[in-house]
Image: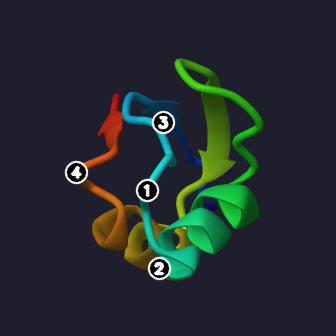
Amino acid sequence: MEENKTIKITLKKSLIGKSERFKAIIKSLGFKRLHQTIEVKDTPAIKGMINKVSHMVTVE
């Protein structure tokens, strides 16, 4: 049986001056502030969102 795998993501770059698309992706991932670390499920949809904003986040 597959375990519930998670990914830790930290928001490293500010959203100031970024497009609405990037802001929406960051918000949907669950970030509320800069340098916040969150833990999300490891799903293809989440990985796609992380790839879109990979220049703004770090993944552990």
Q: Which of 16 and 60 is in front in this view?
A: 16
Which residue is identified by label 4?
55
Hey, what amino acid is under mark 2? Pro
Q: Distance between the residues labelled 4 and 3?
A: 12 Å
Residue ID at (49%, 69%): 22
The image position of residue 15, as x and y in percent, is 51, 48
Q: Which mark is residue 17?
A: 1
4 or 1: mark nearer the eye: 1
Which quadrant of the rendered structure holds the N terminus?
Answer: bottom right
Task: Give the answer, above or below, for where 2 lies relative to 15.
Answer: below
Label 2 secondary element: helix
Q: Are marks 4 and 3 in contact (CB under 8 Å)?
A: no
Residue ID at (69%, 28%): 33
Circle nearer the N terminus (3, 2)? 3
Hey, what amino acid is under mark 1? Gly
The image position of residue 4, as x and y in percent, is 67, 50
Residue ID at (41%, 69%): 47
Which residue is identified by label 3?
9
Q: Do the residues labelled 4 and 1 touch (CB within 8 Å)?
A: no
Hey, what amino acid is under mark 4? His
Left or right placement of residue 3 versus residue 21 in this view: right
Spot the residue most to the front: 17
1 or 2: mark nearer the eye: 1
Hey, what amino acid is under mark 3? Ile
Left or right placement of residue 32 versus residue 46 in this view: right
4 or 3: mark nearer the eye: 4
Q: Nearer the viewer, residue 1 or 5?
A: 5
Circle 4: is it few (<14), some (14-19), or many (20+) Cα within 10 Å? Answer: few
Q: Nearer the viewer, residue 19 or 33?
A: 19
Left or right placement of residue 57 versus residue 8 in this view: left
